[in-house]
Amino acid sequence: MSIPVVTTIELQSLPKLTSGKVRDLYEIDDKTLLFVTTDRISAYDVIMANGVPQKGAILTQLTAHWFKVLGERIPGLKTHFISLTPPPSVSDEDKALIRGRSMQVRRLKVFPIEAIVRGYITGSAWNEYQKTGTVHGIPQPAGLQQCSPFPKPLYTPSTKAELGEHDENISPEKAAEIVGEKYAARIEELALKVYTTAAEYAREHGIIIADTKFEFGLDEETDDIVLIDEVLTPDSSRFWPASEYEVGRDQDSFDKQFLRNWLTKEGLKAKDGVEMPQEIAEATSARYKEAFKLLTGKTLEEALGEL
Ligand code: ATP
Ligand code: MG
């Protein structure tokens, strides 16, 4: 039996608060959300008309795995994770729609910045470096090659754009203006710590995390900074197979590269409502599953069987 690809979900049991590019957020109570990940995929900030098979489950189960690993390796780390099981108020019919793709999370005030950490020079950072010798305006040593590691991981925050807008790079000083001095340094420190810890774990499992994006929330009762959202998935990160890694060239990544290459080839980059051919959707799903297996040591089916 083939599993349906789900791009829109309308649960009957809970009120929907918002929809992002990939996720729908439902209200459980004042302090708790049901975080539902669909199979939607965005590339160049535009959502495709059709979805990627099992993507929502892959991202949800991988994020839960990371929360467990990070919790073990970073004493005192706070995350928004509560449970992979929906609350009893969700009907059986709704439970079937969100199987494997939902997470109960703590509802928090979101800091409106994207905490990006880069361990390796690629993408827009590589383009900037070739022109100016800087990344995010920060001077870098001469002689870095494409995809070289940075001497140490770089924190390069950006704004969190509204749907349809583009994120904008900002300096750490501007980030401090947005989130407040008091929290900016703690967010930077935590983002670097989580990246470094995850990069080490991933390397033990055959994956290089070239860069990634975190979001953080504030627990207003304790004043703690909390790791929220999805973490360290192929949507929020560039994952490279360690066995094929070589400096001086582009890497074959585990993320949306198939889709981006196809969009570029067809001249459909950043166009609305594009439908991917089935083979592109399937190839993307297969890549996401491969990364899942390497990082968790389980197939997605095994992980879902344990729920
Ligand atoms: P993209 O991830 O591509 O930038 P997006 O930001 O629109 O797209 P989605 O991943 O589709 O995001 O939706 C998740 C939304 O939920 C984000 O706006 C994120 O800030 C928010 N969010 C994540 N965790 C929490 C939380 N614990 N409490 C409140 N909001 C949260
Ligand atoms: Mg998101």
Image (spheres, rainbow, N blue to C red):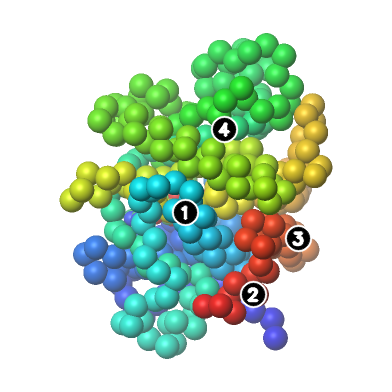
Residue 221 lies left or right of residue 107; in this view the side is left
Classify 10 Å Cα crowding around label 1: few (below 14), some (14-19), many (20 and above): few
Distance Cα–Cα, label 2 vs label 4:
32 Å
Give the label, 3 or 4, closer to the camera. 4
Give the label, 1 or 2, closer to the camera. 1
Q: Residue at point 47% right, 54% down?
A: 72
What is the quadrant of residue 106 in the picture?
A: bottom left
Look at the numbered disc 4 and give the secondary structure of its residue.
strand
Look at the numbered disc 2 and give the secondary structure of its residue.
helix
Q: Amino acid at mark 1?
A: Glu
Q: Which residue is mark 1?
A: 72
**Pointer 3 with pointer 1, Cβ within 8 A:** no
Q: Find out if the beta carbon at label 3 lies less than 8 Å from the nearest ligand 1 atom.
A: no
Q: Which residue is mark 3?
A: 283
Residue most toward the bottom?
92
Classify 10 Å Cα crowding around label 4: few (below 14), some (14-19), many (20 and above): many
Q: Which residue is mark 4?
A: 118
Q: Residue 249, how many percent across, how many down?
A: 80, 31
Look at the numbered disc 1 and give the secondary structure of its residue.
helix
Give the label, 1 or 4, closer to the camera. 1
Look at the numbered disc 3 and give the secondary structure of its residue.
helix
Give the label, 3 or 2, closer to the camera. 2
Indicate which disc, 1 or 2, sits on the residue closer to the N terminus: 1
Indicate which disc, 1 or 4, sits on the residue closer to the N terminus: 1
Q: Is residue 218 above or below residue 27?
A: above
Q: Residue 298, how many percent across, how many down?
A: 66, 67
Q: Amino acid at mark 4?
A: Arg
